[in-house]
């Protein structure tokens, strides 16, 4: 099961008895009618400790800010030193582009212009 | 000139990372100016060095707003806040900026609101809420670690937006940009080295790049490391046999120093590798420090903090030499009962009155003087018992 930080997720109904264990983990919020929200990486590890016994694993889903594709943290050279508690990063392909800094800045400019409505 | 100042972002697009958070703030500000004032302000929360303050100034610049800032170095009692920012009805400093007309070009910025002390800064938080509820000027507040209890009203009133540490790839973008502007050639190895070790702290990364550009060796162990997660801080402290490294770690994470002390106290009490004489010596050290912390907190004698900062590195160094071992985790029940010191007494009362009273059938006095010390000095290795205790507490 892939999840995105900050977005809600639900656990399968058959694992309902694990609800209390998950909701008592620090960094996990439960919003009635919406689902669980993970707020930090440590919480994800703790949830996976519970779910792995049931054959489930939650993987954080992070989008590339430049191309919008998925960022695979397992492939990243910084995997071990990264907290991963973000919703956006830069994918491997975009990261290797020569003009990375300018592309990133122009992407941000577009975003701001879109918001301001220029 | 420090590069952190020289390259402080001028526009929103110059702020690297936290894209969603930035969008939310911009949307809120646009809504504010179009008349939708559902939230009187936003509260930006996140560890230091990740661009909260820079973003606020960039935001103000982009929208042509004048920032009126009150940060931790200002006195922030209700009286001072009203004097600086202005009681809504009367003339104030704020009016001096805006004339007598509507306050269209002001952005109020309360930095480090979690540092407002309920005792020393009497009425400070209430004054901020009061000004916010008038909805005359947009307000941005920033905090490192807002307390759900102490800042409950603030959290309920303001729109809460989390800023997160940058990823190493985002740090590299930032560093490459600065290197290009400075016209210096930086190896990928150096960039990777900085990005992997700064723990998402952009300010520290820029400082390290500047040091490296001046030909200084970057020794990450002797470099201040702000915003370390608590368990990482304990892990690094327990693995260190270098007094300078310990001192640097403590100095740059001084907001966690009391928790560090109680963690060490806890590690000493249940350590099996330490001789009896060493334990006695270290516990005597603990008593002295505990007395200082107690006096400092109770009488607000903050001058004692410098003595604590002098003694703590040597205490930790002696404990490490005496064989204190950290096994990588602190059991949750121990963390709640013995380390979360600031809410310790309240929390303990709550635990006792809510749960333990019914189970133990003993008085509060007996619980505090006999049961609790027994739990403290027993190192429970059994996982099932530990789970049970955690659930009960």
Image (cartoon, rainbow, N blue to C red):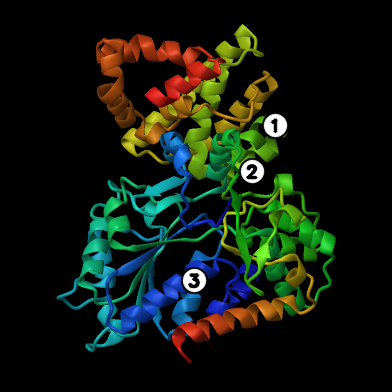
Q: State the residue in front, B232 or B169.
A: B169
Nearer to us: label 3 or label 1: 3
Classify residue B214 as left or right of residue B19: right
For marks 3 and 1 on the same chain, the one whose residue lies earlier in the sequence: 3
| Mark 1 lies on residue | B239
Please identify the quarter of the rendering in which residue A24 is found: top left
> Looking at the picture, how far across and down is residue B203, in whole percent?
61, 62
Name the quadrant containing residue B143: bottom left
Badge 1 marks a residue whose secondary structure is loop
Spatial distance from mark 2 to mark 1, Cα to Cα? 14 Å
Q: Dot 2 surroundings within 10 Å: few (below 14), some, or many (20 or more)? A: some
Using the image, tell me which numbered label, if any, was put on residue B22. 3
Q: Position of residue B130 (x, y in %)?
A: 21, 64
Residue that carries the numbered disc 2 in the rendered image: B248
Q: Nearer the viewer, residue A24 or B131?
A: A24
Q: Earlier in the sequence, mark 2 or mark 3?
A: 3
Indicate which label's residue lies in the foreground, 2 or 1: 1
Instruction: Judge the density around disc 1: few (<14), some (14-19), many (≥20) Cα neighbours within 10 Å.
Output: some
Determine if residue A25 is in view. no
Chain letter of the residue beneath label 2 in the structure image: B
Q: Secondary structure at mark 2?
A: helix
């Amino acid at each position: 099961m892939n999840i995105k930080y900050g977005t809600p997720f639900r656990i399968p109904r058959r694992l309902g008895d694990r609800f209390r264990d998950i909701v008592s983990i620090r960094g996990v919020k439960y919003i009635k009618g919406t689902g669980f929200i993970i707020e930090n990486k440590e919480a994800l590890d703790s949830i996976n400790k519970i779910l792995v016994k049931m054959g489930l694993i939650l993987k954080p889903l992070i989008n590339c800010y430049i191309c919008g594709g998925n960022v695979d943290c397992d492939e990243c050279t910084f995997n071990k030193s990264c907290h991963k508690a973000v919703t956006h990063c830069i994918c491997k392909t975009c990261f290797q582009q020569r003009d990375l800094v300018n592309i990133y800045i122009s992407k941000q400019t577009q975003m701001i212009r879109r918001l301001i409505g220029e | 000139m420090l590069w952190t100042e020289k390259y402080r972002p001028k526009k929103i697009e110059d702020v690297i990372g936290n894209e969603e958070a930035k969008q939310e703030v911009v949307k809120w500000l646009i809504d504010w100016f179009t008349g939708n004032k559902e939230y009187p302000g936003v509260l930006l929360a996140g560890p230091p060095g990740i661009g909260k303050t820079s973003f606020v100034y960039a935001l103000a610049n982009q929208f042509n707003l004048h920032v009126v800032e009150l940060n931790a170095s200002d006195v922030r009692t209700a009286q001072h806040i009203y004097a600086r920012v202005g009681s809504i009805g009367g003339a104030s400093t704020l009016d001096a900026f805006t004339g007598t007309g509507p306050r269209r070009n002001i952005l109020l910025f309360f930095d480090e609101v979690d540092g407002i002390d309920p005792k020393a800064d009497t009425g400070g938080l209430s004054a901020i809420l009061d000004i916010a509820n008038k909805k005359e000027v947009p307000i941005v507040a920033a905090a490192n670690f807002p307390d759900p209890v102490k800042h409950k009203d603030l959290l309920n009133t303001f729109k809460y937006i989390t800023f997160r540490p940058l990823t190493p790839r985002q740090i590299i973008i930032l560093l490459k940009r600065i290197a290009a502007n400075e016209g210096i050639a930086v190896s990928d190895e150096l960039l990777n080295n900085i990005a992997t070790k700064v723990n998402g702290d952009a300010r520290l990364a820029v400082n390290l790049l500047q040091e490296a550009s001046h030909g200084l060796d970057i020794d990450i162990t002797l470099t201040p490391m702000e915003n370390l997660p608590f368990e990482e801080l304990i892990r690094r402290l327990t693995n260190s046999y270098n007094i300078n490294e310990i001192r640097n770690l403590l100095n740059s994470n001084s907001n966690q120093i009391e928790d560090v002390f109680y963690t060490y106290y806890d590690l000493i009490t249940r350590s099996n590798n330490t001789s009896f004489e060493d334990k006695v010596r270290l516990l005597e050290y603990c008593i002295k420090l505990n007395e200082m912390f107690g006096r400092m907190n109770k009488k607000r004698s903050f001058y004692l903090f410098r003595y604590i900062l002098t003694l703590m590195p040597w205490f930790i160094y002696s404990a490490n030499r005496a064989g204190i071992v950290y096994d990588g985790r602190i059991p949750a029940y121990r963390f709640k009962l013995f380390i979360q010191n600031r809410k310790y007494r309240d929390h303990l009362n709550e635990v006792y009155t809510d749960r333990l009273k019914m189970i133990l059938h003993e008085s509060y006095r007996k619980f505090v003087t006999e049961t609790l010390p027994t739990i403290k000095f027993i190192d429970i290795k059994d996982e099932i018992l530990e789970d049970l205790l955690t659930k009960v507490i």
